[in-house]
Amino acid sequence: MEITQHLFLNLSLLIIVLFICLIILEKRQQFSLSRFGITCLFIVILWLCIQFSYNPIPSVRYDLRLIPIVLGGLYVGIGPILVVALIILRSFYGLHLGFYQTIILYLPLSIILWKLYPWFLKQVPVRRILVTVCIGMCLGVLTVIGMTFANTHANLFDAWFAYLVIPSLGIGIISYGIEFVRKINEMQQQLIKAEKLKAVEQMGAAISHEIRNPLTAASGFVQLLEDDYLSRHKRREYLSIVKEELFSAERVIQDYLTFAKPSLEQFEELNVKSELRQIINILQPLANQNSVEIITDFSVIGFIKGDGQKFRQCFVNVLKNAIESMPNGGYLSISTEFSQSYVTIKVKDTGVGMSSKQLERLGEPFYSTKGKNGTGLGMMVVYSIVRAMDGSISVESEMEKGTTFLFEFPTIPSILMNEQTGRA
């Protein structure tokens, strides 16, 4: 049973090579190759089959070349290319009778596989596996018949068993693996598509909810303004409300644009201390309303490069959320630290805090810890602006104890040094 033993070893090597290729593709997070890459892979496998074949006499080589030929021809449609490669490779091992038998058997096979390829792809997976196994068995029979006519003095029982069982078994295992990987790939694509559709639905719902409210209010007051007997004072009051509601709708749209396109429009030198002072002055009435005491500890210096308007928008969102997380009052601590490389801004509150699951989803599109009262726009914008300014965010939180945000932005000297290094 020497032929059977060697073909089993050949099949084991083939499966190991394919398994390694599968691991490499999985590490690349994709289960697909270009047509050129697949062709090269099959030619390499074909060479391995011939190189590690069993050749008791110089004119005969027992191997599993039919496996890559059948699978490549039916699944990829490269049967003629593989047959040409097979003939070229086989010629390097001698122009004996076996070489001419290879031409006689595999040249017609290449045409058959090329014709079957479009029909084969339209079949269901189970039928595709059965077709490949049946073709493998037919080729095994023809191979043994050719050996009989060539009078290779091989053990016919050994040859029949080896070429009827092992190629069919190998083709069945590998074709099942191909179908399994294809199914996983299709499921991944469907999952990605479903996630995209879900994101679009959430975005549509969020935009509809956030913009409809101010537009509905504005529309109502416009109808009231149509009253000819409305007093001048009321008319001015209603116009002010309409203007405010339209500005509110514009801010929602601007938030979405900031998230979708986080690039900064202009860069300027920002004094972190003075910028934060200005933001605190804006939010001080809200803090007083919620009985929140703001405590500051700013370093003397600290300059970064960025867009002042976007920077203020970012920290207004963060500080506003911190204040709103303390409806019964508390402390909001804001501090900065300066080093040669970074300016660190620490924002700590004593609010309701967040769970570990909420922390994991913080900044995720359309996710809000406020439930129905928010759409997640604020934190989306915060993360987008910080990324655009080459900064980083880390968050720690504990339920009923508060949340700490830690921001790091590169200082102007470090930015200039990086730019000079890049130019060098």
Image (cartoon, rainbow, N blue to C red):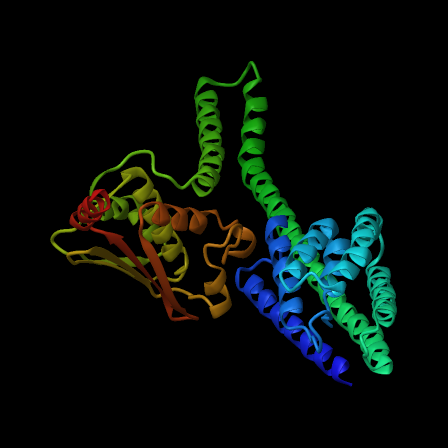
The residue located at (46%, 58%) in the rendering is 362
The reply, left or right, for residue 323 in relation to residue 203 is: left
Tell me if I can see residue 289 in this picture: no
- The residue nearer to you, when weighing 416 against 211, is 416
Number of marks: 0
On screen, 208 above or below 180?
above
Residue most extreme to the top: 228
- Dividing the picture into quadrants, the one containing residue 2 is bottom right
The residue located at (56%, 14%) in the rendering is 228
On screen, 311 above or below 17?
above
- The residue nearer to you, when weighing 419 against 360, is 419
* Residue 241 rendering spot, x and y as whole percentages: 47, 30
The residue located at (42%, 66%) in the rendering is 353
- The residue nearer to you, when weighing 281 against 383, is 383
* Residue 122 rendering spot, x and y as whole percentages: 83, 50
Residue most extreme to the bottom: 1
- Dividing the picture into quadrants, the one containing residue 101 is bottom right
* Residue 332 rendering spot, x and y as whole percentages: 29, 60
| The N terminus, quarter of image | bottom right
- The residue nearer to you, when weighing 270 against 23, is 23
- Dividing the picture into quadrants, the one containing residue 354 is bottom left
| The C terminus, quarter of image | top left
The reply, left or right, for residue 185 in relation to residue 222 is: right
* Residue 146 rendering spot, x and y as whole percentages: 85, 67
Residue most extreme to the left: 300
The reply, left or right, for residue 71 in relation to residue 252 is: right
Tell me if I can see residue 12 in this picture: yes
The reply, left or right, for residue 287 in relation to residue 146 is: left
The residue located at (66%, 67%) in the rendering is 50
